[in-house]
Image: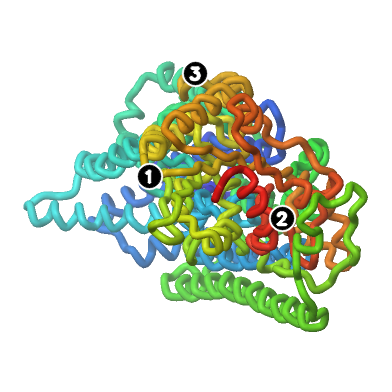
């Protein structure tokens, strides 16, 4: 959302556009955009594409900022960077500083301590408006998989806009310098050329990255710059647009609103975005803005009503506050990362009007209009103070994290003792009525703050691809030992700590071919958003042949979480278990025909909630986090039975008697999602070894 798009007061006049007059239609368009975002975040089913409201804001921002720059260039022959940036600082930073304080209070009072470290980093990144790049990295980070939403996650759009505001005035100055050296003056045509140098490569990159790396594509500035440039091009061409007949402009405005509505009502998380799909809402927003250029007679009247003006005036504050309030409500109602009940979510979003209105009236508007901050130097001081507030909030949360770590360490010292983990269950199958001897352990390892980092690996490396790249190959053990290929996704990866110990004892040579969310199968799986996992298809095109055609491999260890598949990315409407079983059966038979011995490691149950925050919230009674074992992936074991492939099943030790305990033998069992902690897996090494040897490994 935006620095310049959402803070103009309600007014009787026409509206801020390229001409400088206040445009009520743009104020109303702001209202449309923010309402779409709020309804989407509340989970209203009919507005599955409400996220396009942010794209509408991008176009508005590009238009308004460029109009401001054009007026200054054409009236003075240049642009004052100090005045430009001071205006942005007065408009944006005080309101965000207040949100930083609110988010800090929400974090320390309501959110589990396991989220504090991430939020502290988000606070610092948001203060410098680079949080979108941090979120882009986290979207493809294995350690961040299933991480709870940050109360500052919505700041990514603010960061994109502020980065554009830094670049675009500098580009205008460069064009001014170049024009004067060429003996002329900067023209709108040259400005349009400069904008196209931003827009066209950005659009092309957006289309490419949306397909190749959708998680990163959503957040990075380079895939969004063209949307702001589109609005800027509108401002540059405003005079030409104003000469269009009123009926043409009015029709364009209604068609633009229709395009935004179609995107909001028909898009959902399965639509590749931004990419080509973002053209629909952005061109729609451009058409609405174009309709109101010139005399304003073509503007879409529904946007100029009083309610639309009121919502549009507060849209920036509404955007800032609604998301932290939703996160706080989720913590209060203990949704464990799930969604709030729809009526509750709608009510919560409605209640966010209260802090938004207060912030708008008490902070945003007074400081923006204050004569004391009208000059660049006082505005710079104000900006510095606001940034320091964000950093101070980050420091406060970091300090709280450090204090919690000290308390966690002291708890372990006070409960000094062994942490045998699964060894307390013995090597024989645990009895069905097994329960922990200590029902409420207080000195378990890893502690809550360290659980998320207790990740598997080999020799200090994670040895798994978490991005769009190829599967990661790591090797461990004597080169002349029997070669054991470890293939699959993160559910096979979690067993590496135990496998490395076994390999050392038995002289195996381990070789990994692992990729997160990517089972070892020649079929297409879908990601959590229901989209075909194209990077996995691409990786498997080479991974499967590389493994199955390698004569040096003696044994193939396989595991995965995905249970359904479809034939190809273009034929993926209805993934089925039958197809996954069929394709896995083919993989196992091909491995057997190549002289390899495949062995399946059965998947383990998935908790109904995230275990890290649950354990952190129930330190005195972690049994509150136990759950009944659920049915796991069947396709892999069905394929194993069809090919007489041995199956190694450690679920009786993971969930003895069908109950999955959060702590076994003083060791936390689950890390994130359905992944086990590396510490617990290590304690299972003797059991895993016995079963693998029983399956035929030397």
Q: How far apart are marks 1 and 3 (CA)?
A: 35 Å
Marks 1 and 2: which is nearer the front? 1
Crowding at dot 2, Cα within 10 Å, few <14 / some 14-19 / many 20+, comes out as: many
At 49% from the left and 43% from the top, the residue drawn is: 555
User: Which of marks 2 and 3 precedes in the sequence?
Assistant: 3
Query: Residue 139 versus residue 523: which sits nearer the camera?
Result: 523
Q: Do the residues labelled 3 and 2 touch (CB within 8 Å)?
A: no
Residue 393, placed above or below residue 329: below
Q: Are marks 1 and 2 in contact (CB under 8 Å)?
A: no
Query: Residue 345 versus residue 296: which sits nearer the camera?
Result: 345
Query: Is disc 2 placed on a helix, strand or loop?
Result: loop
User: Which of marks 2 and 1 precedes in the sequence?
Assistant: 1
Q: How many marks?
A: 3
Q: Give the side of residue 389 with respect to residue 514, left or right.
A: right
Q: Position of residue 407 (x, y in %)?
A: 76, 79
Q: Can residue 644 be seen in this view?
A: yes
Residue 613, placed above or below residue 71: below
Q: How far apart are marks 3 and 2 (CA)?
A: 35 Å
Q: Is residue 302 visible?
A: no
Q: Mark 2 points at which residue?
A: 670
Residue 540, placed above or below residue 376: above
Query: Is disc 1 placed on a helix, strand or loop?
Result: loop
Q: Give the side of residue 124 with respect to residue 173, left or right.
A: right
Marks 3 and 2: which is nearer the front? 2
Q: Are marks 1 and 3 in contact (CB under 8 Å)?
A: no
Q: Mark 3 points at which residue?
A: 571
Marks 1 and 3: which is nearer the front? 1
Q: Mark 1 points at which residue?
A: 552
Q: Give the side of residue 101 with respect to residue 485, left or right.
A: right
Q: Where is residue 346 in the image (x, y as percent from the top left)?
A: 77, 39
Tell me where residue 106 sits by quadrant: bottom right
């Amino acid at each position: 959302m935006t620095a310049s798009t959402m803070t103009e007061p309600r007014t009787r006049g026409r509206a801020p556009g390229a001409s400088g007059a206040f445009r009520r239609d743009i104020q109303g368009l702001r209202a449309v955009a923010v309402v779409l975002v709020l309804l989407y975040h509340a989970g209203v089913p009919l507005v599955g594409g409400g996220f396009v409201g942010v794209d509408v804001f991008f176009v508005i921002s590009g238009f308004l900022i460029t109009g401001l720059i054009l007026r200054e260039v054409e009236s003075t022959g240049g642009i004052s960077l100090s005045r430009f940036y001071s205006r942005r600082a007065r408009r944006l930073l005080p309101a965000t500083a207040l949100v930083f304080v609110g988010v800090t209070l929400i974090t320390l009072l309501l959110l589990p301590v396991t989220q504090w470290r991430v939020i502290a980093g988000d606070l610092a990144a948001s203060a410098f408006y680079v949080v979108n790049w941090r979120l882009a990295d986290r979207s493809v980070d294995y350690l961040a998989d299933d991480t709870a939403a940050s109360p500052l996650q919505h700041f990514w759009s603010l960061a994109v806009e502020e980065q554009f505001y830094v670049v675009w005035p500098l580009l205008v100055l460069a064009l001014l310098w170049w024009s004067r050296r060429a003996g002329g003056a900067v023209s709108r045509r040259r400005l349009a050329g400069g904008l196209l140098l931003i827009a066209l490569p950005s659009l092309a990159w957006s289309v490419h990255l949306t397909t190749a790396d959708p998680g990163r594509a959503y957040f990075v500035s380079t895939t969004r710059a063209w949307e702001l440039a589109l609005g800027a091009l509108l401002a540059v061409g405003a005079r030409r647009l104003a000469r269009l007949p009123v009926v043409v402009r009015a029709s364009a405005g209604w068609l633009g609103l229709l395009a935004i509505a179609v995107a909001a009502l028909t898009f959902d998380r399965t639509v590749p975005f931004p990419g080509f799909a973002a053209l629909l809402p952005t061109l729609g927003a451009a058409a609405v803005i174009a309709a109101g250029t010139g005399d304003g007679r073509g503007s879409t009247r529904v946007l100029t009503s009083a309610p639309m003006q009121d919502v549009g005036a507060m849209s920036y504050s509404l955007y800032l506050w609604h998301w932290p309030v939703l996160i706080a409500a989720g913590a209060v109602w203990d949704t464990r990362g799930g969604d709030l009940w729809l009526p509750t979510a709608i009510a919560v979003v409605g209640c966010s009007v209260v802090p938004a209105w207060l912030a708008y009236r008490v902070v945003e508007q007074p400081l923006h209009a204050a004569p004391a901050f009208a000059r660049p130097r006082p505005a710079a001081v104000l900006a510095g103070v606001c940034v320091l507030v964000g950093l101070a909030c980050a420091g406060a949360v970091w300090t709280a994290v450090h204090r919690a770590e000290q308390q966690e360490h002291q708890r372990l010292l006070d409960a000094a003792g062994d942490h045998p983990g699964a060894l307390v269950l013995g090597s024989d199958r645990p009895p069905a009525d097994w329960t922990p001897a200590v029902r409420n352990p207080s000195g378990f390892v890893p502690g809550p703050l360290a659980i998320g980092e207790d990740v598997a690996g080999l020799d200090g490396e994670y040895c798994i691809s978490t991005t769009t790249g190829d599967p990661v190959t790591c090797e461990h053990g004597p080169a002349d030992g029997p070669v054991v290929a470890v293939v699959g996704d993160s559910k096979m990866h979690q067993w590496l700590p135990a496998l490395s110990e076994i390999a050392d004892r038995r002289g195996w040579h381990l070789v990994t071919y692992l990729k997160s969310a990517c089972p070892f199968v020649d079929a297409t799986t879908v990601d959590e958003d229901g989209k075909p996992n194209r990077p996995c298809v691409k990786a498997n095109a080479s991974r499967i042949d590389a493994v199955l055609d390698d004569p040096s491999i003696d044994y193939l260890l396989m595991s995965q979480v995905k249970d359904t598949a479809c034939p190809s990315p273009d034929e993926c409407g209805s993934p089925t278990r039958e197809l996954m079983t069929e394709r896995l059966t083919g993989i196992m038979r091909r491995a057997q025909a190549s002289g390899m011995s495949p062995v399946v490691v059965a998947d383990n149950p998935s908790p109904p909630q995230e275990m890290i925050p649950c354990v952190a919230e129930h330190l005195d009674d972690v049994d509150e986090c136990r759950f009944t074992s659920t049915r796991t992936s069947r396709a892999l074991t069905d394929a194993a039975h069809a090919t007489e492939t041995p199956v190694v099943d450690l679920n009786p030790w993971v969930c003895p008697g069908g109950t999955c305990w959060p702590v076994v033998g003083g060791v936390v069992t689950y890390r994130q999602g359905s992944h086990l902690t590396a510490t617990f897996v290590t304690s299972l090494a003797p059991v895993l070894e016995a079963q693998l040897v029983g399956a035929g490994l030397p």
